[in-house]
RNA sequence: GGGGGAGUGGCGAAAUCGGUAGACGCAUCGGACUUAAAAUCCGAAGGGUCGUGAGGCCCGUGUGGGUUCGAGUCCCACCUUCCCCA
C-alpha cells in the first residue's frame, strides 16, 4: 500500500493500475480524459463494494460506519446542481471513513412509487413503470458521473416487486398487531387527481401537487395507528443527535398535552357532553360550550327551532379546511343549538345554564370534538364571546403587574384561582390537580393526555403504489395475505387512469381482484387501494444493509452488524413526516424483533438549499439565465432586447428558468471541479447561491495542483525531483508545517461539514508549495494528495498513480495529524492601547507575562509617551492591552 | 399567527475561548511572459483621510442601547430576509 501503514483492503485493485497504464501521457490538466478513465477503473475493480457479514472478504475487525443520503424521487427532469450537494458531502465523509479503515455502508436507491409518475402517465400515455425505469436510468447515469462512491451492488427501487414484497410484509406485521385498520373518515378528496390526499398534501384547500381544488368526503380508508407510539416517538428523541430545530418540529407535531376529560350534563337530555381541556382549573369560568360541526351528539342536542340554522352552518363548514377553521386571525363564526349544559362541579342549583354552540373552530378529530369555553382565559373563546356578546368571567387572577380582564385583555397564563369555590386561592398547578381529583372522585371526569398527532391515513385510490396484501371475504372479514404468497404484485394495466366515479383503477382489474383464499379455497377479493408514497421510504435504510436477501426484509446478522444509520443527510423538508413515519415503522420492527435499535437515524444533518439567480424584465416576465448577459457596467441585460433586468435570488426551479444541469457543468469543467465548487461555496448546512462565474476558480485550483506535480513543459508523467525529506530531530520545514496546518483544518471541517474551509486550507497549501516547489518533499506531496482525495478523487487518484502507487488512493490510509509539526517557537504578539491595535511584534512562545509586557511597552513606546498606564491586560500567546488615562 | 436560521467588501465567504475583522476564492485593476491573444505567473485592493514616500490617523461586521480593558462573537430592543409549521 501507498505509504505503508494501512492494512490491505478487501477489494483487489490491480485492475486500477492496469487501466492507469493505458493513459495517454499528457502534460496539462485534462479532466475529460482522466475522469472517465478512473470511473471505469473503479467500477471494474468494484472498489466501493462493501462486503457484508458472511461474505468471504468481510473483515469483522473493522468498525462500521453507515452514511446515508435521503434517496431521490426519480423525476423526469433529472438532477439539477442542488440535488448532489448533500450527496457530495456524504461522499466526502464516506471516502474519508473508508481511508480511516472503517467498513463503510454508503448506498443509493430510488423512491420510485408515487403520484407524479402516474400523473405523467395519464397525460402522455406512458406507463409509469416505463417512465420510472427511464428516469432511474437518467438518475443513475448522472449520479455515477459525479464520482460518488456508492456501492451500486446495493441499489434498490421501491417499485421493484422484490423490494415491495417486504414493504407489504411489514404492513402485514402492522396488521397483525392491530396497528392497521380500515375506517370511514372524512378525507380530502381531489376531484382532478381522483384520489384521497393526506392533510399535509393539501394546502389551503388545494392539492400540494398540481394545485387542484379539494373537498372533504367520508370514505373507507386504511389507517395506521401511529398514535399508539406517540409517547415513544416523543421520548426517544432525547437519544438521537439531531438538529434541535428538527426535534422541536417533531415534538410540536406530536403535540402532547395533558389535561382532563369532563362530562357536562345537558339540560333536558339524558346525555352528557364530554369535553377535553388542558385547564380544568378554569371550569367555573366556562360561560358557554362549543361542539364541532361533525360532533355525533349535535343532532340530538339541537332543538327544533334551531335545526335549520345549525344544518346550514354544518354544511358550510364541510367545505373549509382545518387550516381555515382554526386560523386565529379569522372572525369566529358559530350558531346556537338552543340547548344548555351545567357545570358538573357547581353546587346543586348554583350553576348558571351554559349555552351550547356549534362552531367550526373546534375540530372533531382533536380531543373529544367539544370544548368548554372560558373566554377570560383563552384567546379563541375570548374572541367568540366578543362576537356573540357572551359572559366573560375571570377565574384566574394574573400575577402582580400582568394585564388581565381588568385591563380588558385575555389572560392565558398561570395565576391564582378566584370565583371557583373548591379551589379559590390555589395557584394554577395546584388548582388543576384539585379539579382533576374532584372530577375523578365524583366520576364525572378524569386526567387525560391527548395528542395533536392523528392516525396516519395510509391509502390512496391510485395505481402506482404498493397493493395492500389483504383479502376481503364474502362475510365482510379481512385477512392478511400469507408470507409465502407475497408479494402481491401490481397487475399490468393498459389504462390506469382513475375512474370517473373515483373508484381506484385497480378495481377495474377484475381478474386480479377476484381470487381465492389459499387457506379455504373460497372466493375472496383483493383490496384495490394502494399505499402512499411514504411507505417505501419508511424502511429503505434497512434494506440497504442486506438488499438481496430473499428470506427476510433484512437478515439478522447484517442488521446486528450495521446497527442504525450513523449519519443521515437530507433536506429539512422531511423534518416531520418522512422522519416520523420511518421512526414509527422502526419502532414497530423493534417490537417485532426485526431490529435491535430503537431509533433508525443516530445523527441527522440538513443540507442547505441551493439558490440561483433568476432574471425578470420590467413586465415581471422571467428571462432564462442563458438569454442574459452582463455588461461592462455590471448591469444584466437581455441578449435579445438589451433591456435591463432585475436580478433575484431564488430556489432553483423550472418555473423560474434558473435550473443549472450538472451534466453541463461537468462537460465544461470536469467532475472534480464541480465537486470542489459545490463544497467551496459555503458550509453544507447553509443555503447559498450558485454563481456560474465562480466555478472557474475551483478549476484553476485543480490546475495549480496539477502543475505542482506535473511539469507542463515536459512529457514526463510527473516531476521527478522532490525536496529533502524532513528528519526526525531536525527543524520542521515550512512546507511540512504548512501541510499540517491544512490537514488540521480539513479534520476540523468534518465536525460541522464546512468543507469550504477545508478547500480554502488546501488552496493555501498549494499556493505556498507552488512558491517554493523545490522544497516540497515527496512525503509531504503524498500527504497532500491523500487529504485532497475525498474532495477531488479523480485528480488525486491520477497523480497518486503517476507517483508510482499501484493501489487505489481510495483505500490508502488517511494521514494522521502530526501535532509536533504544528508547533512554533514564536508567535505574533498584538499590542493594543485602550483596545486599539498599535503594533504587532514577534514574541517567544513560552514568554511569561512580565516579559511580554516589557516587549509590548517597547513596541508601543510612542503611543504611551507622556501617558500613565493604569493597567496592562496580558493574554499570553496573544496580546497585551495597555489601559491609559 | 407560531417556530427556527441568517444579515460581515462589488459577489460567495472566513474569523476554536470575547482578543489582529475580511483568510480562501470570484469579479476588478496594474505588471511580467507573448508578434498578439488566451492561458499562466507576480502584484494591488473595505471606506475615508493625511503624507512625495515609507507610513500614519479616523470610521467600519443590519439599526439603537448595554456589559467589558477589549464585542462580528455576550445581553436587551428593533429592522430586513430566508426556511419550516399552522
Image (cartoon, coloured by chain):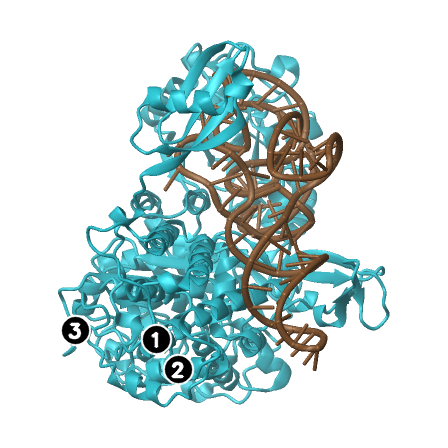
Q: Quadrant of residue A858?
A: top left
Q: Quadrant of residue A776?
A: bottom left
Horizontal placement of A729 versus A603: left or right? left
Which chain is disc 3 placed on? A
**Residue corresponding to mark 2:** A716
Looking at the image, which is closer to me, A63 or A834? A834
Looking at the image, which is closer to me, B72 or A153? B72
Q: CA distance from mark 3 to mark 1?
A: 39 Å
Horizontal placement of B60 versus A470: left or right? right
**Residue corresponding to mark 3:** A58
Which dot marks residue A720?
1
Q: Which chain is cyan?
A: A
* Disc nearest the viewer among 3 and 2: 2
Q: Would you say residue A169 is visible in this rendering?
A: no
Q: Residue at x 41, y 43 (%)?
A: A244
* Disc nearest the viewer among 3 and 1: 1
Q: Colour of chain B?
A: brown
Which dot marks residue A386?
none
Q: Residue at x 19, y 50 (%)?
A: A729
Residue A710: x and y, percent?
A: 42, 75
Quadrant that contains the C terminus of chain A: top right
Residue A290: x and y, percent?
A: 57, 35
Q: Residue at x 22, y 78 (%)?
A: A11
Horizontal placement of A151 versus A833: left or right? left
| Dot 3 crowding, Cα within 10 Å, few <14, some 14–19, many 20+ | some
Which chain is disc 1 placed on? A
User: At numbered mark 1, what does the secondary structure look like: helix, strand or loop?
Assistant: loop
Q: CA distance from mark 1 to mark 2?
A: 8 Å
| Dot 2 crowding, Cα within 10 Å, few <14, some 14–19, many 20+ | some
User: At numbered mark 2, what does the secondary structure look like: helix, strand or loop?
Assistant: loop
Amino acid at each position: 500500500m501507498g505509504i505503508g501503514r494501512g492494512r490491505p483492503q478487501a477489494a483487489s485493485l490491480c485492475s486500477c493500475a492496469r487501466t492507469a497504464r493505458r493513459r495517454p501521457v499528457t502534460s496539462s490538466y485534462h479532466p475529460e480524459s482522466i475522469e472517465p478513465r478512473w470511473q471505469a477503473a473503479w467500477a471494474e475493480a468494484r472498489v466501493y463494494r462493501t462486503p457484508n457479514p458472511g461474505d468471504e472478504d468481510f473483515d469483522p475487525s473493522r468498525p462500521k460506519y453507515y452514511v446515508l443520503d435521503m434517496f431521490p424521487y426519480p423525476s423526469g427532469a433529472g438532477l439539477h446542481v442542488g440535488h448532489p450537494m448533500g450527496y457530495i458531502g456524504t461522499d466526502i465523509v464516506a471516502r474519508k471513513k473508508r481511508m480511516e479503515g472503517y467498513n463503510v455502508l454508503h448506498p443509493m436507491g430510488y423512491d420510485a412509487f408515487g403520484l407524479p409518475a402516474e400523473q405523467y402517465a395519464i397525460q402522455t400515455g406512458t406507463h409509469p413503470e416505463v417512465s420510472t425505469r427511464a428516469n432511474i436510468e437518467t438518475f443513475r447515469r448522472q449520479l455515477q458521473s459525479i464520482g460518488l462512491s456508492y456501492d451500486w451492488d446495493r441499489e434498490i427501487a421501491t417499485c421493484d416487486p422484490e423490494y415491495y414484497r417486504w414493504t407489504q410484509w411489514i404492513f402485514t406485521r402492522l396488521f397483525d398487531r392491530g396497528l392497521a385498520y380500515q375506517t370511514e373518515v372524512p378525507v380530502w378528496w381531489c376531484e382532478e387527481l381522483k384520489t384521497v390526499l393526506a392533510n399535509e398534501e393539501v394546502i389551503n384547500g388545494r392539492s400540494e401537487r398540481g394545485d387542484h381544488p379539494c373537498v372533504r368526503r367520508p370514505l373507507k380508508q386504511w389507517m395506521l395507528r401511529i398514535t399508539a407510539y406517540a409517547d415513544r416517538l416523543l421520548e426517544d428523541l432525547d437519544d438521537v443527535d439531531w438538529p434541535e430545530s428538527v426535534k422541536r418540529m417533531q415534538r410540536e407535531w406530536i403535540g402532547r398535552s395533558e389535561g382532563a376529560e369532563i362530562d357536562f350534563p345537558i339540560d333536558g337530555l339524558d346525555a352528557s357532553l364530554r369535553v377535553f381541556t388542558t385547564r380544568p382549573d378554569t371550569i367555573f369560568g366556562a360561560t358557554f360550550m362549543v361542539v364541532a360541526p361533525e360532533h355525533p351528539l349535535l343532532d340530538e342536542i339541537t332543538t327544533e327551532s334551531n335545526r335549520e340554522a345549525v344544518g346550514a352552518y354544518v354544511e358550510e363548514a364541510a367545505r373549509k379546511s382545518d387550516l381555515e377553521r382554526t386560523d386565529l386571525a379569522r372572525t369566529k363564526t358559530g350558531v346556537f343549538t338552543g340547548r344548555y349544559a351545567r357545570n358538573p362541579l357547581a353546587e346543586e342549583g348554583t350553576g348558571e345554564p351554559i349555552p351550547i354552540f356549534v362552531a367550526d373552530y373546534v375540530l372533531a378529530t382533536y380531543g373529544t370534538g367539544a370544548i368548554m369555553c372560558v373566554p377570560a382565559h383563552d384567546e379563541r373563546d375570548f374572541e367568540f364571546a366578543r362576537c356573540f356578546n357572551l359572559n366573560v368571567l375571570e377565574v384566574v387572577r394574573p400575577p402582580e403587574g400582568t394585564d388581565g380582564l381588568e385591563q380588558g385583555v385575555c389572560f392565558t397564563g398561570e395565576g391564582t384561582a378566584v370565583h371557583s369555590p373548591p379551589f379559590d386561592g390555589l395557584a394554577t398547578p395546584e388548582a388543576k390537580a384539585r379539579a382533576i381529583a374532584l372530577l375523578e372522585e365524583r366520576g364525572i371526569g378524569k386526567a387525560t393526555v391527548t395528542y395533536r398527532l392523528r392516525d396516519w391515513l395510509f391509502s390512496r385510490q391510485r395505481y402506482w403504489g404498493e397493493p395492500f396484501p389483504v383479502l376481503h371475504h364474502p362475510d365482510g372479514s379481512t385477512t392478511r395475505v400469507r408470507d409465502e404468497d407475497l408479494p402481491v404484485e401490481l397487475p399490468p394495466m393498459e389504462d390506469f387512469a382513475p375512474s370517473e366515479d373515483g373508484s381506484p383503477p385497480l378495481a377495474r382489474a377484475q381478474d386480479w381482484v377476484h381470487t381465492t383464499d389459499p387457506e379455504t379455497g373460497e372466493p375472496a377479493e383483493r383490496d384495490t387501494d394502494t399505499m402512499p408514497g411514504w411507505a417505501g421510504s419508511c424502511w429503505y435504510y434497512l434494506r440497504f444493509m442486506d438488499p438481496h436477501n430473499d428470506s427476510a426484509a433484512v437478515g439478522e446478522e447484517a442488521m446486528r452488524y450495521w446497527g442504525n444509520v450513523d449519519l443521515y443527510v437530507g433536506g429539512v423538508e422531511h423534518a416531520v413526516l418522512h422522519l416520523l413515519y420511518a421512526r414509527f415503522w422502526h419502532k414497530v420492527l423493534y417490537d417485532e424483533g426485526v431490529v435491535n435499535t430503537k431509533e433508525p437515524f443516530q445523527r441527522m444533518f440538513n443540507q442547505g438549499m441551493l439558490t440561483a439567480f433568476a432574471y425578470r424584465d420590467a413586465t415581471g416576465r422571467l428571462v432564462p439565465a442563458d438569454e442574459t448577459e452582463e455588461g461592462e457596467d455590471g448591469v444584466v441585460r437581455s441578449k435579445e432586447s438589451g433591456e435591463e433586468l432585475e436580478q433575484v435570488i431564488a430556489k432553483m426551479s423550472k418555473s423560474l428558468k434558473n435550473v443549472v444541469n450538472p451534466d453541463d457543468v461537468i462537460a465544461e469543467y470536469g467532475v472534480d471541479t464541480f465537486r470542489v465548487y459545490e463544497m467551496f461555496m459555503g458550509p453544507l448546512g447553509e443555503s447559498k447561491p450558485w454563481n456560474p462565474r465562480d466555478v472557474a476558480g475551483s478549476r484553476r485550483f485543480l490546475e495549480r495542483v496539477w502543475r505542482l506535480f506535473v511539469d507542463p513543459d515536459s512529457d514526463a508523467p510527473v516531476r521527478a525531483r522532490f525536496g529533502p525529506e524532513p528528519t526526525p530531530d531536525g527543524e520542521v520545514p515550512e512546507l511540512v508545517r504548512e501541510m499540517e496546518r491544512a490537514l488540521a483544518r480539513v479534520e476540523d471541517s468534518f465536525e460541522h461539514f464546512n468543507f469550504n474551509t477545508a478547500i480554502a486550507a488546501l488552496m493555501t497549501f498549494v499556493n505556498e508549495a507552488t512558491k517554493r516547489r523545490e522544497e516540497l518533499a515527496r512525503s509531504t506531496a503524498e500527504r497532500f494528495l491523500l487529504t485532497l482525495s475525498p474532495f477531488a478523487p479523480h485528480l488525486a487518484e491520477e497523480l497518486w498513480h503517476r507517483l508510482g502507487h499501484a493501489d487505489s488512493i481510495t483505500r490508502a490510509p488517511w494521514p494522521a495529524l502530526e501535532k509536533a509539526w504544528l508547533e512554533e517557537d514564536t508567535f505574533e504578539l498584538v499590542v493594543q492601547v485602550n483596545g486599539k491595535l498599535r503594533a504587532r511584534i514577534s514574541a517567544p512562545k513560552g514568554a511569561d507575562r512580565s516579559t511580554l509586557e516589557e516587549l509590548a511597552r517597547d513596541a508601543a513606546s510612542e503611543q504611551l509617551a507622556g501617558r500613565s498606564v493604569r493597567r496592562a491586560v496580558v493574554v499570553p500567546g496573544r496580546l497585551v492591552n495597555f489601559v491609559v488615562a
